[in-house]
Image (tube, rainbow, N blue to C red):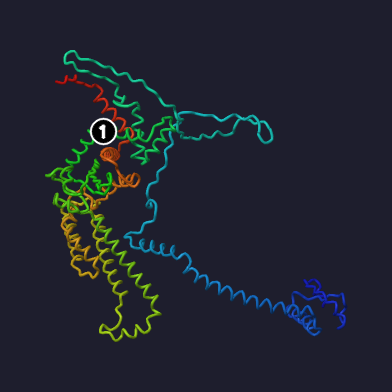
């Protein structure tokens, strides 16, 4: 070392205890200049060479550990590669049913015409619950000292107002004594009874009980037993039979309003109709619905034929019928618009079925590829040139159905988009010509699939009635309005299963019809039902009873 390097940093290495045999002192240290790398490397090589020349056990142990470490690293890399391969193979066989269901859902999602994320569309104005004005002010308890340390507190530095909406406590059942005045007319010997309009003509239960029972059954869709439980929590204990009797009385009182609703439906220019089955005492009946712009009417009949339309709408009804196109509709009137939703749904199902068939055939063919062997060689001698490519044929049938499906969806989407703008009559005529020309193009094609040919035959029969709504403003292309109205009774059917007798038929015709009509008109069902019952009872609050004639 030179005097010039005394102020430079150094690395101190202690000598091993056996260094004294080669001229080094036993407890001295080597100083390696950290600045000069060449000097440093020479000194390290000198020490390592000394250890190797002296057969140092630490050096041998270090070399052995390095070799083991290298082998372990190679083994870890080998196991990681093997684990990655086995993980991929396991993913094919684990939860295979779940994977198939997921692939099926993905295929169905890919068949949709438009891609839309769940939730409201982007840019849709949000809504916030409005804050009502408080009716009661409740102040917090004043604190004089800290609950933790007992230090005295001054006046609060902040008072926060929290507006809370609370339901009122359940009040006890109110018992009302209504007085009825009975009169005897001296002129005609009639007995006249006068009562308050809120007093029901029959029974011991009040108007609110009738209203709540009706809404719990047909709005909340509760069974009779659950309705009794709800009313018992409010302090009124009634049985299931009593609930059924209350509903029957309400349907009887609403009879005149139901007849008025039927008369309004007959006067409508456009009626959307549909039907679904239901059991009545083990026999097959059908729920019909007739929907207009402001009315919804339900009828339950043992037939789905023309006789129901004649009974509800009349034999010479001049309006337009929007329907799914059953025979009863065509035999009733020719002024029909066929629902596009039924046609699009059917072709979607056909295309999906053909796609699944083609994919199943491809998988089956791949599984049997190893077993082809001699059968494949023998097939070469056939007259048809070998085994027929069934998978290719199935795929071609699917592609035909898929092309038809896309073509029908394009026609419907263009008509719908144009009708939403309210075009004038001249432009509506152009839309009709476009729709018929585009539809004829797809119907004239030759399809190999039997299901597609059957579907095309059905569309050809409906061809004259698919563009009726285009010429008439305000008429929808689909029958979804009727489908949505019918869904209410479909859910009720799933709950009750069946109707027992004519009492249930009358109940499920009248009450749902009036509730759906009120909701369609933007009226509150509870308030409207209460006002309707009051009006009906008011019309019968003065009863005129003729004296009984003695039997001859």
Q: Looking at the picture, how far across and down is residue 289, in whole percent?
A: 24, 45
Residue at the disc numbered 1: 252
Q: Is residue 292 left or right of residue 208?
A: left
**Among all residues in the image, which is located at the extreme front?**
552
Q: Is residue 392 above or below residue 258?
A: below
CA neighbours of label 1 inside 10 A, class few (<14), some (14 to 19), many (20+): some
Number of marks present in the image shown: 1
The C terminus lies in quadrant: top left
Q: Looking at the picture, how far across and down is residue 11, in whole percent?
A: 78, 73
Q: Residue at x 21, y 64 (%)?
A: 454
In which image quadrant can residue 458 be found?
A: bottom left
**Among all residues in the image, which is located at the extreme bottom?**
381
The N terminus lies in quadrant: bottom right
Along the line of sight, the residue nearer the viewer: 373 or 104? 373
**Among all residues in the image, which is located at the extreme left?**
316
Query: SS at mark 1?
Result: helix
Q: Residue at x 44, y 28 (%)?
A: 171
Q: Looking at the picture, how far across and down is residue 145, in whole percent?
A: 66, 31
Q: Looking at the picture, how far across and down is residue 313, in whole percent?
A: 17, 43
Q: Is residue 335 left or right of residue 160?
A: left
In which image quadrant can residue 533 be found?
A: top left
Q: Is residue 169 above or below residue 448?
A: above
């Amino acid at each position: 070392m030179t005097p010039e390097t005394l102020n430079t940093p150094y690395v101190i290495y202690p000598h091993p205890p056996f260094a004294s045999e080669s001229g080094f002192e036993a407890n001295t240290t080597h100083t390696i200049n950290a600045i000069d790398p060449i000097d440093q490397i020479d000194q390290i090589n000198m020490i390592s060479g000394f250890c190797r020349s002296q057969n140092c056990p630490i050096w041998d142990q270090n070399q052995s550990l390095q070799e083991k470490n290298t082998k372990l690293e190679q083994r870890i890399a080998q196991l990681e590669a093997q684990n990655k391969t086995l993980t991929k193979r396991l993913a094919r066989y684990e939860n295979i049913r779940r994977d198939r269901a997921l692939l099926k859902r993905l295929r169905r999602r890919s068949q949709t015409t438009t891609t839309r994320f769940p939730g409201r569309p982007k840019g849709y104005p949000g809504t916030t619950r409005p804050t009502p004005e408080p009716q009661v002010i409740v102040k917090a308890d004043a604190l004089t000292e800290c609950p933790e340390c007992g230090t005295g507190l001054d006046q609060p530095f902040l008072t926060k107002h929290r507006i809370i909406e609370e339901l009122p406590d359940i009040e006890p059942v109110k018992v009302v004594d209504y007085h009825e005045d009975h009169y005897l007319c001296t002129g005609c010997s009639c007995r006249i009874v006068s009562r308050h309009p809120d007093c029901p003509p029959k029974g011991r239960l009040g108007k609110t009980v009738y209203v709540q029972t009706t809404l719990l059954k047909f709005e909340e869709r509760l069974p009779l037993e659950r309705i009794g439980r709800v009313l018992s929590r409010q302090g009124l204990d009634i049985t299931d039979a009593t609930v059924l009797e209350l509903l029957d009385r309400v349907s009887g009182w609403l009879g005149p309003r139901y007849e008025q609703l039927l008369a309004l439906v007959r006067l409508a220019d456009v009626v959307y109709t549909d039907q679904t089955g239901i059991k009545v005492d083990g026999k097959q009946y059908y729920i019909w619905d007739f929907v207009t712009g402001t009315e919804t009417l339900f009828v339950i009949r043992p037939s789905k034929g023309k006789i129901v339309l004649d009974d509800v709408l009349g034999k010479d009804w001049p309006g337009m019928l929007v329907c799914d196109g059953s025979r009863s509709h065509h035999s009733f009137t020719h002024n029909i618009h066929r629902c596009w939703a039924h046609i699009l749904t059917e072709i979607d199902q056909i295309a999906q079925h053909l796609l699944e068939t083609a994919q199943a055939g491809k998988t089956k063919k791949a599984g049997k590829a190893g077993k082809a062997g001699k059968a494949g060689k023998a097939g070469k001698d056939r007259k048809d040139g070998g085994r027929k490519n069934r998978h290719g044929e199935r795929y071609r049938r699917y592609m035909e159905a898929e092309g038809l499906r896309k073509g029908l969806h394009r026609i419907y989407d263009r008509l719908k988009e144009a009708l939403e703008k309210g075009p004038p009559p001249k432009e509506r005529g152009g839309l009709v010509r476009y729709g018929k020309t585009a539809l004829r193009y797809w119907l004239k094609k030759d399809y190999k699939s039997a299901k597609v040919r059957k579907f095309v035959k059905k569309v050809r029969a409906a061809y004259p009635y698919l563009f009726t709504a285009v010429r008439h403003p305000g008429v929808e292309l689909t029958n979804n309005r009727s489908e949505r109205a019918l869904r209410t009774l479909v859910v009720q059917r799933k709950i009750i299963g069946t109707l027992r007798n004519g009492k249930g038929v009358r109940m499920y015709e009248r009450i749902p019809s009036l509730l759906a009509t009120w909701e369609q008109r933007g009226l509150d069902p509870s308030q409207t039902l209460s006002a309707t019952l009051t009006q009906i009872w008011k019309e019968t609050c003065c009863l005129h009873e003729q004296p009984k004639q003695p039997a001859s």
